[in-house]
Amino acid sequence: MRTILVGASLFALSAGAASAAGKLNFYCSAQEEWCQIMARGFEEATGIDVDMTRKSSGETFAQVKAEATNPKGDIWWGGTGDPHLQAAEEGLTEAYVSPMRDQLHPWSLAQAASAGDRTIGIYSGALGFGYNSDLLAANGLPEPKCWEDLTKPEFKGHIQIANPNSSGTAYTTLATMVQLFGEDGGFDYMKRLHANVNQYTKSGSAPIKAAAQGETTVGIVFMHDAVAQTVAGFPIVTVAPCEGTGYEIGSMSIIAGARNMDEAKQFYDWALSVEAQNLALQVNAFQVPSNMNAETSDKAPDFAAIKLIDYDFKKYGSSDERKRLLSKWDSDVSTLPQ
């Protein structure tokens, strides 16, 4: 069992207070191990009981929306920022200004500003893909270095990506292609990619896990998820595409009407602390943390070496734009033969 190292100096309660602590219903859209260590870490720091539910960001957004008249969750942590921004726009999340904000990177605060303080950035990660070098060699495939390489006929049946309706990772991919190549060019790319996809998964990280297990050659994911598979000992090579790429600002939001609002605010403050953000290193989560004093792994993708687009979070995180792009993907891309 992992030891959870939590410096709880700002958040520790006396034994008496801890015994009287409440509970927290925690919706988590990061990797399972990270969700678990955050839940257990907060329990240790505060004595508050945490009931954690892990789903992808698209699924969690749908659940928060479905429960809007009778909220069951208190806080939503992790997952791509776009659905958090949409939830903010639809009034599904609560505005909150944490006393921890002076410790955060500007990109984290920009996320909060664009949502009227109804969400905030907790980590950042660049989009890319990873491939299984053993399978690539066994199939005589050329080393892919660019997005365009993945549309070559020889990659037919060798690529996995998540479904953008359920996965924030895949929606970020769709929005990235539209911003890289224009809307017509972006959808043309998604159509050509579709011809080579062997499966659309529910979870954004599932494609690279499948590649690690030898079930597919290429997985389109956030680069930190590919690095995690390499660190775990699998023959995965991580690629920052040559044309440029988008990125995510993983976010956190308090759910409007939360039953345990005080506990939700306590978690929010704790999750922005150095101590909480450093827990990522224990579970091989290689994102860049939002607290300026938190540690970034030396194995994390180097943002300075990646050609990043100026991703328009406000536009592509808006409810209308997200619905429009997903509807167009459903009608123009997913229905095509493979």
Image (cartoon, rainbow, N blue to C red):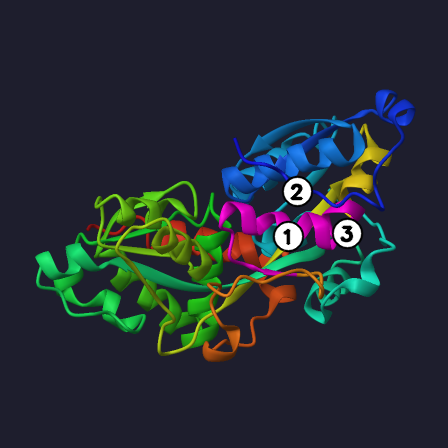
Mark 2 or mark 1: which comes first in sequence?
Answer: 2
Quickly name the residue at label 3. 118
Quickly name the residue at label 1. 278
Identify the residue at horizontal 78%, vertical 28% (top origin). 48
Mark 3 or mark 1: which comes first in sequence?
Answer: 3
In the image, what residue type sits under mark 3? Arg
Query: Can residue 271 be found in the magenta stretch?
Result: yes
The picture places residue 194, in percent across and down from the top left corner, at 27, 56
Q: Nearer the viewer, mark 3 or mark 2?
A: 2
| Number of numbered callouts drawn | 3
When the figure is inspected, residue 35 is found, relative to residue 142, above or below; the finding is above
Q: Which mark is residue 176?
A: none
Image quadrant assignment for residue 156: bottom left
Task: Pick whichever, 266 or 275, lies toward us.
Answer: 275
In the image, taking residue 4 as reference, residue 96 lies left or right, namely right
Q: Which mark is residue 5?
A: 2
Task: Pick whichever, 192 or 1, lies toward us.
Answer: 1
Could you classify mark 1 by the number of other residues whose Cα lies within 10 Å: few (under 14), some (14-19), or many (20 or more)?
Answer: many
In the image, what residue type sits under mark 2? Leu
The picture places residue 96, in percent across and down from the top left corner, at 84, 50
Task: Pick whichever, 284 or 96, lies toward us.
Answer: 284
